[in-house]
Image (cartoon, rainbow, N blue to C red):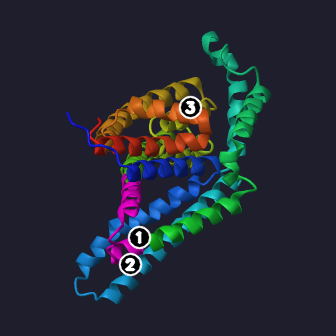
Amino acid sequence: MKINAVTKIETAAWLIMAAAMLYVLNYNLLPGLLAGLLVFELVHIISPYIAKKFPGLGYFSKVIAIGLLAAFIVGLLTLVVLGLIAFFKSNSGSLTNLIGKMAQIIEDSRSILPDWIDSRLPADAVVLQQMVTEWLRNNASSLQFLGKEAGRYVAHMIIAMIVGGMLALREVMTEDHYKPFAKAMAQRVKLFGCAFRNIVFAQVRISTINTVFTGTYLAIILPSVGVDLPFVKTMVMITFIIGLLPVVGNLISNAVIVIVSMSHSLGVALGSLLFLVIIHKFEYFLNARIVGGKIRANAWELLIAMVLMEAAFGIAGVVAAPIYYAYIKSELRERELI
């Protein structure tokens, strides 16, 4: 099989793209990148419906319509981000309170746990809190948006969303005739945007389905049999947000729910575990069908990529890994190497 020769222009474009991807991770710009890409892709997805719905729109009317769409999307996403930050800082949704509650549940549940489980748990609540604190400290750069640096990260995201909206408006309204290097860079950016769209929007569908089932279990099924768990809203929110991470997110949210279920009884914890394992198997199937189908990758491929990226870049690496991996595969597929 003949492989087309790589030009110097393509090599330069790849090197610049690789440097940009590393820069984003090293300087904590991932939230801004994802926010900008989200607005860019949403405008591109919705704008054709505007053109189809109002075929008689003139050029300037179309510009105004798509501009208003971009502004609406930016405003809505900004409110969502601010709302999530406010929720997780409130007393009812506080992550700190949830972690403290989980530590206390583990301490109080030792007497009913089998020895083989008890031997693998932290010695007491203080040790668990110390472990969590150490983990948070090691990943502080990626979690600052929940703390005192919230304003800075929100500002990055808002600016990036505005830029994403402006670029989407320009892309929709104009047709550029690129020079060779600009064309090569535009192709890299297009492939990266497609990787983002394939991973994120597919994972949003999976996480939404998973959250609906989990929320039904926590807020309807358990209360109907007389079991009222604390932090239900927080756990549902965590299920959706953490569930945006393929495979790993589901495991993290499941662990939180099972531990909190132990506050009622071991039987409820085992019931929660059984229910969540079934949902996890269902999500694994969805992951293979939806995400795997989009980028032609198995769940184990994404998991390996996430482990390697976490070791190198912490939490930001875990979030970026599926998108970066999908982009790299699309580049290789473009060259017919895989």
Numbered disc 1: secondary structure: helix
Q: Which residues are magenta?
A: 168-194
**Which residue extends farthest top?**
115
Instruction: Choose the circle earlier in sequence order: 2 or 1.
Output: 2
- The image shows residue 157 at horizontal and vertical percentages of 58, 63
In this view, the residue in front, 144 or 228, is: 144
Residue 6 sits in quarter: top left
Task: Tally the marks.
Answer: 3
Q: Is residue 47 above or below residue 152?
A: below
Residue 294 in the image: state x and y as whole percent: 30, 45
Which amino acid type is marked by label 1? Ala
Most common SS among magenta residues: helix
Tell me the distance, in whole angstroms, between the alpha carbons under discs 1 and 3: 40 Å
Where is mark 2, residue-wise? 66
Residue 168, numbered circle:
1
Disc 1 vs disc 3: which is toward the camera? 1
Q: Quick one: label 1 or label 3, which is nearer the N terminus?
A: 1
Which of the two discs, 2 and 3, sits closer to the camera? Answer: 2
Find disc 3 in the rendering and name its residue.
255
Q: Residue at x 35, y 45 (%)?
A: 331
